Image (tube, coloured by chain):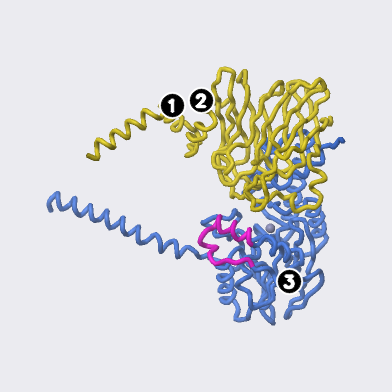
Chain colours: A blue, B yellow
Amino acid sequence: MSAALLRNLAGSAFLALFLGVGFYVPQVRAGSLDYQLAPRLVAEDTWVLIGKREDFSRSNGGNIVNTAFVVTTDGVVVIDSGPSRLYAEQMRSAIARITPKPVIRVFNTHHHPDHFLGNQVFADVSTTALAETIAGQRREGGAFADNVYRLSGDWIKGTEPVAARDPVGPGTLLIGDHRFELIALSGHTEGDLVIRDLGTGVLFAGDLVFHNRAPTTPHASISQWLAALDRLDAITYRTMVPGHGEPVSDGRAVEQTRRYLRWIESALLQAAERGEEMSEVLGLELPKEFAEIPLAREEFARSVAHLYRGYEATTLRHRR
Amino acid sequence: MFLPCLFTALVVFVVVSPASTFAAMADDPLQSPQWTDIRDRYLGADKVVFDPRVAVSGPKIAEDSMNVPVSVKISGLVDVRRVLVVADLNPIVKVLEFSSKGALPSLHFRMKLQQGSPVRAMAQTGDGVWHVGGIWIDASGGGCTAPSVGRSAAGWTETLGQVQSRVWQNETQSRVKLNIMHPMDTGLAPGIPAFYIERLSLQDAAGREWMTLDTFEPVSENPVFSFDFSGPPPAGLTLVGRDNNGNRINARVVK
Ligand SMILES: [Zn+2]
């Protein structure tokens, strides 16, 4: 084989590789729009889809949230519909692989986009939430969908914000062979629905509880949130499913969330009382127990934007 | 035919543009496409240096694009006459201008960002040289074209121009923080004309000015400013100012 031929072969191999990559990449992209939802059995009839402890991104498509479903004798009860149409479609497929029973009810624990933007896929069943949650979904759903699309791109295509249809208050609700206690709280948002399955002892805490994932505060009232955590402490459960992070069988996730909220409240209040400016507060050192939690720095900076002006206002005085 | 023409055009271009413009664009630590325009518009032919003594701080990402906290602190630079703050990619580039006439050459404020942008402080010293520092702040946007929040609340006209304040003091320094009630409308939200504070001055009991500010539309609604003084603040500080509709601001600073 002549040297010239070798060079030619090498050249065309290079070209083929180049073209091959060009051909292959779109297929990988298309194929990768798979949330790879893997329901995990945490109690009898009770499955949880654990999201990544990350922020919205183009690689995770918004699969950063825990959703769940309970298979009753009458049908399937879904708790939170996920961040997109695609997520909810894939969730329905995952449910169908586990049970032939139809989905008959969807609860939204609160109005944040990762918990309800899948609602449009459940147009055929009752979607249920607290009245405050429905109002928030109507008010902010459009902005949420735009924002999530900006952060997660193609995964969110075709996602329309659909508010829950049926308002619900506190009480108990029998669905098939499962009796659910609905507990209406607030603090993470204006309406935080906690759902307890009285038979299995599973408590779906929504975003009132974050576990090894920094809490988010865009609609938070820290004092109400702390009061809500005290309420959760008074409830018995066998398994707690937090809104983000691994399920637990004890109070450690509640305690971690409480310690973080107490710290952020006192740190921001003390900084305001020292006269610090927002841009200075951003540089505050995080206590070691929180510094290593995923997204702690990012969420702290966001919380300064959400909360600091409120604390600052209490330090300023008016004189006529 | 073509080549000589192109060559001529190039030569003309090089001759017309001062060489320093190219140097400045290449040097811009923030690599902003707007930098040479901003330089030409606000600094003219004056000498410009990028100077770490002009420190700008703020968030990496603006969570609330209507209220982006920014601090400008200038240290180790003597005879600072005035400081311009600009956001290269904002629809209204100029945020404010301040002159410390006794106060420390630093200022803390919050601003609106329409999109991710460099935010720069450009400080001119007595020799005419501009010392420029800045950071890049990312933003999802809408800060300038969204209507002010207070517009939707009843009674905002009753609190217009009201001032809340507080003074903090330690062994070496003091800080005056002020909150002024004002919608600071940019004029970019549909149907709402520009309505903003354009002049503020901190004066002592004898009427001496310690800090003056020219403020523009990108300053946040109900603005909060902090001013720092070496040692205690001057006695009897008063905030005096006006907006572009002629409304007056006049408030004693509360310790
Ligand atoms: Zn949430």
Please indicate, yes or no, whether residue B247 appears anywhere in the rendered image.
Answer: yes
**Residue position for label 2:** B48
Per the image, label 2 sits on a secondary structure element best described as: strand
Given residues A206 and A41, the one toward you in this image is: A206
Please tell me if label 2 and label 1 are on a single chain.
yes
Question: Which residue in the protein does label 1 denote?
Answer: B20
Kindly state the secondary structure of the residue where label 1 is placed.
helix
In the rendered image, residue B84, in percent from the top left (x then y), is placed at 60, 30
What residue appears at the point 77 percent right and 45 percent down from the top-left corner? A310
Mark 1 Cα within 10 Å, few/some/many (few <14, many 20+)? few
Please state the extent of the stretch shown in magenta in the rendering: A142-161
In the rendered image, the vertical position of residue A115 relative to residue B56, given as above or below: below
User: In the figure, residue A125 lies in which quadrant?
Assistant: bottom right
Which residue is more in the foreground, A301 or A175? A301
* Amino acid at the residue labelled 1: Ser
User: Magenta stretch containing residue B163, yes or no?
Assistant: no
> On the rendered structure, is B30 left or right of B62?
left
Residue A229 is left or right of residue B68, and the answer is right
- Is the Cβ of the residue at disc 2 closer than 8 Å to that at disc 1? yes
In this view, the mark in front (3 or 2): 2
Camera-near label (3 vs 1) is 1
Mark 2 Cα-neighbour bin, 10 Å: few <14, some 14–19, many ≥20: many
Compute the Cα span from label 3 to label 1: 74 Å
Q: Chain of mark 3?
A: A
Q: Is residue A308 visible?
A: no
Q: Amino acid at mark 3?
A: Thr
Report the label total: 3
The kind of residue tagged 2 is Val
Question: Between disc 2 and disc 1, whose residue precedes?
Answer: 1
Q: What type of secondary structure mainly makes up the magenta span?
A: helix
Label 3 in the same subunit as label 2: no
Q: Chain of mark 1?
A: B
